[in-house]
Image (cartoon, helix red, strand yellow):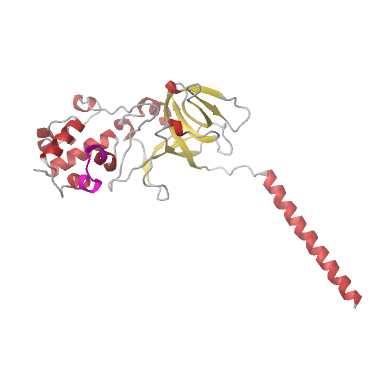
């Protein structure tokens, strides 16, 4: 019953929804390894599971088994337009994603020139699929990451033009006060700020900069599209040195020198005593 066309179809439908194999397996109440077998053609689903897949993907069983859905390409296809995934908003949210040939979730790269379009197509797998992608082997495999190019100087030591990687925040109630986040908003697009969680009290996030020249401001939760927790950044510029740390290091060196001189003086006095 299951065949190469079927496996290709359900893999295509899953990736266009921006779901991992684990997420779909949970939704269909099967093991991830079993679902992986259905995609690669090494296993066949029961008729009851086919019914659940048909309902889940909103595609008839006959089409799942017989039609090559890869032929229905194009962002304006009526077939795909009816199946565009629109994630739910707070308190929990989802984002579209892409996977590599080994079914590992990619880290998508959002350059400066793509920032305006990203805020419009953040939830559309078609739009996300055209972004550059790469892998970072040191990141956790069970979490979703994305890298954004920052275009201002409001968050030193992160310089203008730096690449900031964030971990996707599904539950916005988990946002921790005083921690840096990448926040996607309808009005301001992509911003990198220190956030303070005011969702319960005021239905807002307070966004602050580490550069004192930028004033804090509030953003209504209805204006927030996505939130990403800061993980790390890559920059071509060397951050400004921490003067207090440098001064501390200098004082330690001077103290060691003084201790050495004192020890030498004591040794000389000891030799003179004899």
State whether residue 160 appears in this view: no
Instruction: Where is residue 216? Give x, y as percent.
Output: 58, 25
List x then y, in percent, for residue 50. Answer: 14, 37
Q: Is residue 133 above or below residue 121?
A: below
Say whether residue 51 is left or right of residue 31: left
Residue furthest to the bottom in view is: 274
Q: Residue furthest front?
A: 200
Classified by dominant secondary structure, the portion drawn in magenta counts as helix
Q: Position of residue 110 (x, y in %)?
A: 41, 35
Residue at 25%, 39% in the rendered image: 24
Q: Which residues are magenta?
A: 26-35
**Left or right of residue 81, residue 185 in this image:** right
| Residue 52 at x, y percent in the picture | 17, 35
Q: Residue at (28%, 39%) from the top-left corner?
A: 23
* Res 261 quadrant in image: bottom right
Asked if the magenta segment contains residue 165, the reply would be no
Name the foreground residue: 16 vs 176. Answer: 176
For this rendering, which residue is in front, 57 or 118? 57
Q: Is residue 144 visible?
A: yes
Number of numbered tags placed on the structure image = 0
Specify the quadrant that holds the N terminus: top left
**Image quadrant for the C terminus?**
bottom right
């Amino acid at each position: 019953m299951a065949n190469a066309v079927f496996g290709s179809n359900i893999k295509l439908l899953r990736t266009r929804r921006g779901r991992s194999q684990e997420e779909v397996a949970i939704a269909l109440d099967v093991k991830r390894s079993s679902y992986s077998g259905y995609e690669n053609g090494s296993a066949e689903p029961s008729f009851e599971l086919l019914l659940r897949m048909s309902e889940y993907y909103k595609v008839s069983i006959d089409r799942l088994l017989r039609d090559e859905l890869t032929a229905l390409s194009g962002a304006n296809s009526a077939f795909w337009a009816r199946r565009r995934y629109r994630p739910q908003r707070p308190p929990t949210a989802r984002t579209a994603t892409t996977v590599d040939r080994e079914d590992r979730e990619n880290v998508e790269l959002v350059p400066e020139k793509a920032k305006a379009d990203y805020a419009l197509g953040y939830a559309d797998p078609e739009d996300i699929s055209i972004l550059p992608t790469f892998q970072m082997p040191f990141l956790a495999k069970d979490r979703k990451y994305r890298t954004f190019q920052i275009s201002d100087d409001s968050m030193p030591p992160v310089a203008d033009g730096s690449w900031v990687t964030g971990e996707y925040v599904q539950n916005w109630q988990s946002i921790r006060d005083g921690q840096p986040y990448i926040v996607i908003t309808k009005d301001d697009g992509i911003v990198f700020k220190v956030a303070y969680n005011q969702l319960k009290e005021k239905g807002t996030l307070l966004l602050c900069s580490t550069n004192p020249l930028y004033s804090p401001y509030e953003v209504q939760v209805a204006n927030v599209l996505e939130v990403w927790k800061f993980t790390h950044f890559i920059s071509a510029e060397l951050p400004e040195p921490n003067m207090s740390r440098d001064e501390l290091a200098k004082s330690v060196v001077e103290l060691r020198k003084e201790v050495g001189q004192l020890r030498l003086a004591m040794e000389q006095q000891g030799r003179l005593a004899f």
